[in-house]
Structure formats: C-alpha cells, structure tokens
Amino acid sequence: MTRALLMSSSRKDNLGYLEHADRQLRTILDGTSRKVLFIPYAAVSFSYDTYEALASPAFIAADAELTSVHRFDDPVAAVNDADVIAVGGGNSFALLNRLYEAGLVDAIRDRVTGGHASYIGWSAGTNVATPTIRTTNDMPIVEPPTLTAIGLVPFQINPHFIPGKPQGHNGESREERLLEFTEINPTEDVLALYEGGALLVDGTDGEILGEHDALVFTHGATPADLGRNRRFPLTDLKGPVN
Amino acid sequence: MTRALLMSSSRKDNLGYLEHADRQLRTILDGTSRKVLFIPYAAVSFSYDTYEALASPAFIAADAELTSVHRFDDPVAAVNDADVIAVGGGNSFALLNRLYEAGLVDAIRDRVTGGHASYIGWSAGTNVATPTIRTTNDMPIVEPPTLTAIGLVPFQINPHFIPGKPQGHNGESREERLLEFTEINPTEDVLALYEGGALLVDGTDGEILGEHDALVFTHGATPADLGRNRRFPLTDLKGPVN
C-alpha cells in the first residue's frame, strides 16, 4: 500500500520554498506522526544543514517536523524507523549516487511499498521515485552505479515540465526530449508534471494535484491531458517491462 | 598524435547545417583522403539515411565525401579502414550506447590516438570525445553500460554553452550546472564552447576556433576565458584522475 506525494518543483511563481504545496503536504501527512525524515542528498553546492533549514518551514507550517538523515549515525536504521520520508530536489544523479552509497534505495523502497512509511518527493526526489532517472532534466555530473531508482510508481515522470522553447534557446524543447524518450523506449509512457503540480499515489491509484492537468507522452501519439482531481489506476500508464 | 576537431554545434545563427564550420572542416580535412566515415548513432527520431543526407552537403562543400557507417556490414572494420571519422550530434546517451553496442568506443579511440584517423565531432559527437559524457546537456533517455567515453582529450567539454537563464526558465543556468560539476568533481575542469566554437586538437596541443573565446570552469574559481586562435597545452586543463 504505497502512499506518496510526488511533486514537480519546490517553487511556483514567486512563492517561498514549498509554500505552494501546503495543501498537498497536509494531504499526505494526514494520519501520520508528522515526524518527517528528510533526505538532502540532492544538494550539491550547499550543505545538508542549509538544506534542512531551507525545507523545514513549509513542514512546520503544515504542523510537521523535519529532521535530516545526516543527523543519524545509521541512515538505513533511520529509514527503517521513519513513517514519513521526504526526498528533496537538486541534482538527480548526485541524489541517486548517494542513496546507493548509503544503502537507501532498497531500504526506502521496502519501507514505502510495505506500507510502513509515506513518501514525499519533489523534483529530483520525484525522479528517484520512478523506475529510473532517465527522464530527469539534470546534468549527469556524477555517475551512479545504475540509473535504476526506487520505483514507487511503474512509469517515468518528468518534473518541471515547461512546454515550448525559451527564447534564445537552440536545444530541443522539452516535448522533443520526451518524444525522443518514447521513440527509443516505445513501450514506456512519461507523465509530465507542470511546476506546482504533483502526483498523489494511494495504493494502486493516482491523482493529479495542482492547478494544471498533467500530460502523458506515449510513443507515436500526441501528448494527452491527464485531468486533475480524479483517481486513475496507475497501470493506465505503461512502464518498463520487468 | 591525435588530430581532432571538436565542435560545439551543428548550427549557428541562421546558417545551414554545419555551414558556419566550413573553415574549421577544411582545417581538419587538409592532408587527409577527404573520405569521411560518418557515425549517425546520435539520431533518435529520424533515420540514419536522413542524417547522412543532412550532414553531407557541408562536407561536399569542403571537397570531402561522407559515407555513413550503417552502409557497412562491419562497423569496426569500417573504422579501422577510415582516415577521417565524423560523429554527429543528437542524444549523447543514445550515441554512447550504440557506440558500445557496435564495439566502436575502443576502435575509434585506438584509430585516432594511434594517429591513423582524424576525428570530427559536433555536439553529442564532441561529448563522446571527452573522458565521459558527464557534461552533456542531453536527457539520459537510454542507459549506456557506462558514462565513460572515447576520451580523445583529457578533460570534459560542455557544448552549446549559453550563459545566463532564458526567460521563463526556472531551472539552473548552465553556469550553475557546470559549477555544480566542479563542486562534486573538484579535480576536474570543464571547457565550455559557445555555439559555433570548436576545439582543434593537434597532438598534445589545443586551439579554440570560432568567433568567441571559450570558458574554463575550475573548482572554486570564477570561470576564466580561454583565448581563441592560439595554441595551448591540453594539460593546462585538469581531467579525471586515472
């Protein structure tokens, strides 16, 4: 019985860190101890202390309490004791690499899919909750042992989705990148979440939260809207063949 | 005696495919047979035939002839017979994965570092010429066996360098991404090439070609200009410790 809130971004418009997500956080925190174990491993150019201080206020505002895993001697034991695990954004490759170094990929998967802990992720923390980080927007600044990740949902997610090309940008648009993904992986769909949006996972069902519908990229098809605020079976989207 | 032309991009301003690079191509082709073996493996959403037809005209304009490796039964033998090898842009992960599948990573490295063939790369074709593809701008849509690449130069290159953030873009700027790279890899520099720019490699020396100086990102320092049109020892830039 997996319960997870997979958010696109930590920021929306001019709001503060996770400030847009207050209702989403309250939804996933309801019925838990509200004591949240924070995984700050996606931070690259600032300290884990700084990251904990940055992420805390939004959780305090939602009547919860955040403690970073770097304050524990044994990260695996900390995960095994947690009933809410929050994985913050930053660089997905650094995050996944450090999760493997600490032995947390299997530990988090077991704890969350076993129904013992709820999972909250944003940005890179959402990327690592999918089968692999092959739909991250980040630079691969470090090489993890594999791109295979925690896999709380059976399909890929692309966070920070922005349609079209910014002015003066000569690279591919995001749509082009995701269509390339479906071209080379024709049996897999990608759920694209706009900034401020989220996927709420409740067992085998999902629900899009936020102000926008999500988009589903499927091989050979025009990207399709996935309406918000209604439950759908997670298996509506195709994932890697295991 | 490695000879290589590592270009940032296939396009510049409103010019046609590789049209801006006519002088750069002539420089690297001088003294060769001008028969170029083309590696189209970075193409994802269009065919190798189409890619060969797209890349050919710029080589014909430089009095050379392009033949794609997919027209040969044995890609390794084709590389071992080539005296000019051109690796085109597209997706770096797809490119590197297919190079490994075809057994071409070692074959190209041996042929070029042995002084038997000159190497021409642009965009993803430049990424795979560095020690690893950890400074690509591309989405990791497929997982190669490793991010370790051909390694014709001892340091990382970031192609398509654009300073600052495009409007409406909430992600990191390129500078932020490359500074994160040097943060997590403090013993490694990154050479950033503006669109239209190139690194010409002649043995143990390099030279920046194009209209702009290049930029060197080093841990703990402000990015520094690397002036164009003058030779410098490649070892001026730090690479992965082997």
Image (cartoon, coloured by chain):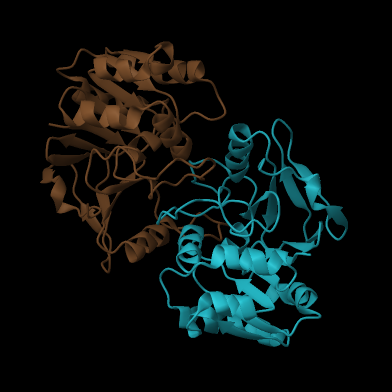
Chain colours: A brown, B cyan
Quadrant including the N terminus of chain A: top left
Q: Nearer the viewer, residue B115 or A125?
A: B115
**Is B227 above or below relative to B48?**
above
Q: Residue at x 69, y 56 (%)?
A: B194
Q: In which quarter of the image is residue A77?
A: top left
User: x, y percentage for residue B173?
Assistant: 57, 43
User: x, y percentage for residue B225?
Assistant: 79, 46
**Is A216 above or below relative to A12?**
below
Q: Nearer the viewer, residue A213 or B60?
A: B60
User: x, y percentage for residue B110?
Assistant: 65, 65
Q: Which of A159 and A100 is in front in this view?
A: A100
User: x, y percentage for residue A177?
Assistant: 42, 59
Q: Nearer the viewer, residue B1 or A37?
A: B1
Q: Is residue B117 left or right of residue A230?
A: right
The number of numbered badges drawn on the structure is: 0
Q: Which residue is drawn at 77% across and 63% down?
A: B200
| Residue B16 in sight here | no
Residue found farthest to the right: B230
